[in-house]
């Protein structure tokens, strides 16, 4: 409960929290906070909350100095996809639409692999797509080459 409470408090106050605040304002918020009602509200608008102590939280994100208390996720995709940086590389680093397209491409490829082949081939398929895209378009599908004038 603490993680969702922290995230909701940070969102409500526009603050960045490293740990649980010791202020009276936070204590009042925490005491009046209903986690079940908040999860229902999130579900009603198509979101879900993944706390940093939950098993699906991306391990690379958890390893940084100041990880967020949790993530608000939209849709039904597995949170495991967040731990796969290949999606951003395939789509093009620095390109939000590219990262989304890369994630979609890799997600579909992994789903088809798991459904029609042995599920142990998922990582090999992802790596093959990554290598193929890097050979054809080194900047990614939507990435733009960096041009330097000298």
Image (tube, rainbow, N blue to C red):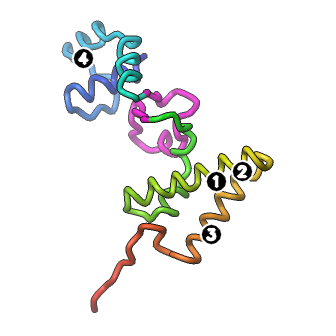
- Residue sitting at x 22%, y 32%: 15
Magenta part of the chain: 48-74
Label located before the other in sequence (4 or 3) = 4
Q: Reply above or below: 27 against 117.
A: above
Disc 4: CA contacts within 10 A as few (<14), some (14-19) or many (>=20) = some
- The residue identified by callout 3 is 131
Q: Are marks 2 and 3 in contact (CB under 8 Å)?
A: no
Label annotation for residue 109: 1
How far apart, in angstroms, are the residues tagged by discs 2 and 4?
Answer: 47 Å
The residue under label 4 is: 26
Q: CA distance from mark 2 to mark 1?
A: 6 Å
Q: Quadrant of the C terminus?
A: bottom left
Figure disc tally: 4
Q: Residue at x 26, y 29 (%)?
A: 11
Q: Is residue 66 magenta?
A: yes
Q: Farthest residue to the bottom: give it.
A: 150
Spatial CA span between label 1 and label 3: 14 Å
Q: Is tag 2's residue or tag 4's residue first in the polypeptide sequence?
A: 4
**Label 1: element kind:** helix
Q: State the image coordinates of residue 37 (x, y, percent, origin top left).
A: 36, 12
The earlier-in-sequence mark between 2 and 3 is 2
Residue mark closest to the camera, 2 vs 4: 2
119 left or right of 80? right
- Of circles 1 and 3, which is in front? 1
User: Crowdedness of circle 2 by 10 Å Cα count: few (<14), some, many (20+)?
Assistant: some
Q: Nearer the viewer, residue 82 or 69?
A: 82
Name the residue beneath numbered marker 2.
113
Of residues 80 and 22, which is closer to you in this image? 80
**Pointer 2 with pointer 4, Cβ within 8 A:** no
Select label 4 or label 3 by which is in front.
Answer: 3
């Amino acid at each position: 409960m603490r993680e969702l409470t922290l995230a909701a408090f940070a969102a409500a106050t526009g603050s960045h929290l490293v740990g649980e605040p010791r202020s009276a304002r936070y204590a009042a918020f925490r005491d009046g906070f209903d986690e079940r009602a908040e999860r229902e509200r999130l579900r009603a608008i198509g979101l879900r909350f993944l706390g940093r102590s939950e098993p699906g939280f991306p391990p690379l994100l958890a390893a940084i100095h100041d990880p967020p208390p949790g993530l608000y996720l939209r849709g039904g995709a597995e949170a495991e996809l967040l731990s796969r940086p290949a999606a951003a590389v395939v789509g093009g680093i620095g390109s939000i639409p590219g990262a989304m397209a890369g994630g979609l491409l890799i997600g579909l490829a992994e789903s088809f692999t798991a459904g029609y082949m042995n599920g142990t081939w998922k990582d090999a398929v992802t790596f093959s797509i990554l290598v193929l895209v890097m050979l054809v378009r080194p900047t990614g599908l939507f990435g733009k080459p960096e041009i330097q004038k000298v």
